[in-house]
Image (cartoon, rainbow, N blue to C red):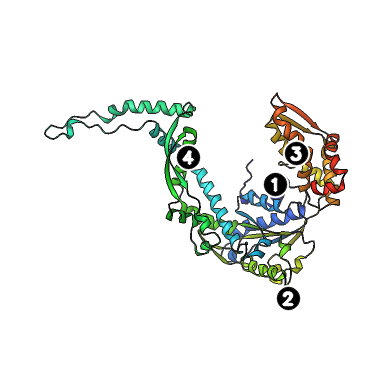
Amino acid sequence: MSERREAKDLTPRAIVEELDRYIVGQRDAKRAVAIALRNRWRRQQVDGQLRDEITPKNIILIGPTGVGKTEIARRLAKLVGAPFVKVEASKFTEVGYVGRDVDSMVRDLAEVSVKLVKDEERAAVQGRARESAEERLLDLLLPPPPPSRSAANTPGRPPAIEAPSDERDSGQQATREKLRELLRQGKLDSREVELEVSEQQGGTAEVFAGTNLEQLGFDMSQLGNLFGGQRKKRRKIKIPEAKELLIQEEAQKLIDMDKVQREAVNRAEQAGIIFVDELDKIAGRERASGPDVSREGVQRDLLPIVEGSTVTTKYGPVKTDHILFIAAGAFHVSKPSDLIPELQGRFPIRVELQPLTQADLVRILGEPENSLCRQYEALLQTEGVKLRFAEDSIAEIARIASDANRMLEDIGARRLSTILERVLDELSFEAPEVGRHGDWVVEITAEYVRQRVESVLSNPDLSKYIL
């Protein structure tokens, strides 16, 4: 089933059910983002000027790392094909050194939106592009004959009577159709054709790195052309590669980029989602000196973006009034109340995500459609190794991960990846050799897990570094 669905069909209950396919627990957070997404559709149904007055109710997700904050926001955006950008608020504290200005998150959203719309347009014209590419490829395989130089052009001679074009070209057309059939059957894949391809010259972007030309609406992609960035070079390549290059080139010709940019800007404004992570890292009031000054400065820079302003991008001005902002942070040391009051007011919905229990970790390993166990099974299946996770092995992995989170830093479900890598390390290394002799079934039991992790668990100092 396709992940993207029509907004009108996505009731809050349906959104939560879709998120349940990939994320375990965190019901309150799922309900909050589901309502926020549904309110977008509701706003589009409102007539008159009142529609512009209805603004998104931005959300703060509060919880430790690895409990699903980012995944909830990312899956939500993917569900409706909305442009999505994740940024770390802490990087804006370094503006003037190695950081970026706050407006860059909106420009990044515009870039993502353009790519999203362009991919949709490319898919729509793929059939026509494939037909045009096939014709161009046949022209390369069988160039049309040059016009005949008859005596008609010789001075002093009467004009010659040429044969009808359909008779003259019937042999050429028959040969072309035979080549078309062979091409579609893949019988010409080993042949090479000479094709003119573009070669992007590097170095231009580095020369202007750190400048804010985008703020002036300058398209950096066009800058390369001024320095010969789009050079053409004739190369001999095999037919399958040539076909793909020609399809891309023909699809690009069929796409109306002005229409794409207009639609992309509109989608960024009306459906864009910006996920601001590590908000707790900039929570702090101004002191006489120290880093808190920088933190409050970032909050004040964020404020106009979240409140609603216009940011200049190379695709045109983008208004942020109706972009949905989802912020997240652990807030172990600071609290949401440590944010400046103006910014607090722009995030009226606050949801606390619960730390993951051992039972949650068991569910995470087995229930989601993209669970870690299914991922490892698919990876090793490519080598001819069939993994079978017994129920007691999943319970044991969850127990070890839960104990490690309790004794060390609590990194949530991310600990599962660390444990599984340790458990399957030897098997992953040996898989190419043992799998070549046919399907090899490996049963992962609780005892198997303990044997692979025991050496680490027996040394608490070592477990701090490995687990």
- Left or right relative to 168: residue 403: right
Q: CA distance from mark 1 to mark 2?
A: 49 Å
Rendered view: 239 above or below 29: above
Residue 463 in the image: state x and y as whole percent. Answer: 83, 46
- The mark closer to the camera, 2 or 3, is 2
**SS under mark 4:** helix
Mark 4, Cα crowd under 10 Å, few <14 / some 14-19 / many 20+, is: some
- The mark closer to the camera, 4 or 3, is 4
Q: CA distance from mark 4 to mark 3?
A: 37 Å
Q: Residue at x 53, y 47 (%)?
A: 120
> Mark 3 highlights which residue?
373
Q: CA distance from mark 4 to mark 2?
A: 60 Å
Residue 36 in the image: state x and y as whole percent. Answer: 68, 58
Q: Nearer the viewer, residue 4 or 357?
A: 357
Decide which of tag 1 and tag 4 comes sooner along the chain: 1
Rendered view: 272 above or below 419: below
- The mark closer to the camera, 4 or 2, is 2
> Mark 2 highlights which residue?
288
Q: Nearer the viewer, residue 181 or 280?
A: 280
